[in-house]
Amino acid sequence: MKKFVFKLQRVLDYKGIRENEEKAEYGKAFSEYENEKTTLNKLKNDILNIMNEKDKEEKMTIDKLKYYGDYLKFLEQKIEFQEQKVENARKYLEERRQKLVEISKEKKTFEKLKEKAKEDYNKETIREDDAFNDQINAYNSSKGEE
């Protein structure tokens, strides 16, 4: 009896490789997204710290007041820019997630095809074994009648 061979095994293997590659890409995108969020939170904390520092000072010169104002304006611009980076990273992460889901579905389809082919192979093997046993039994019973 020949052993089971799935005719689309190479395709299934390729889908598995693509799924692993896409998982790696998704992992990178997730990391990048988390890094961008961390940077944004750090900038927001910087603004809070500067505002607290400014509030603690009792007497402030005009130059120092201008410095705080300029620095806060600078941080707010950086925050706007960083928020855009976070949004872009989130969109890219979602794209990678959708691609991963799509590739995983494709792989699952081929895995189900393989399972079905294996089941059919097993049924055919059992049927052939039964037919062979029937032939042996028929031969033995015809031999015993003689």
Image (cartoon, rainbow, N blue to C red):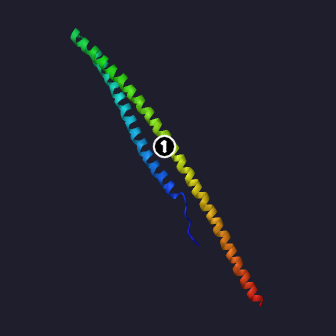
Image quadrant occupied by the N terminus? bottom right
What SS does tag 1 mark?
A: helix
Residue at (44, 45) in percent of width and height: 23
Which image quarter: residue 8?
bottom right
Residue lying furthest bottom in this view? 146
Residue at (51, 47) in percent of width and height: 104
Which image quarter: residue 76?
top left
As drawn, 78 above or below 124: above
Q: Where is residue 40 in the image (x, y as percent from the top left)?
A: 36, 28
Q: Is residue 35 left or right of residue 94?
A: left
**Is residue 123 visible in the rendered structure shown here?**
yes
Q: Position of residue 98 (x, y in %)?
A: 50, 39
Image quadrant occupied by the C terminus? bottom right
Closer-to-camera residue (113/76): 113
As drawn, 132 above or below 8: below
Q: Position of residue 116 (x, y in %)?
A: 61, 58
Q: Position of residue 19 (x, y in %)?
A: 47, 48
Residue at (33, 25) in percent of width and height: 43
Residue lying furthest top in this view? 62
For the residue marked with disc 1, what is the amino acid?
Answer: Leu
Tell me the residue that label 1 is attached to. 100
Closer-to-camera residue (84/44): 84
As drawn, 116 above or below 141: above
**Is residue 61 visible in the rendered structure shown here?**
no
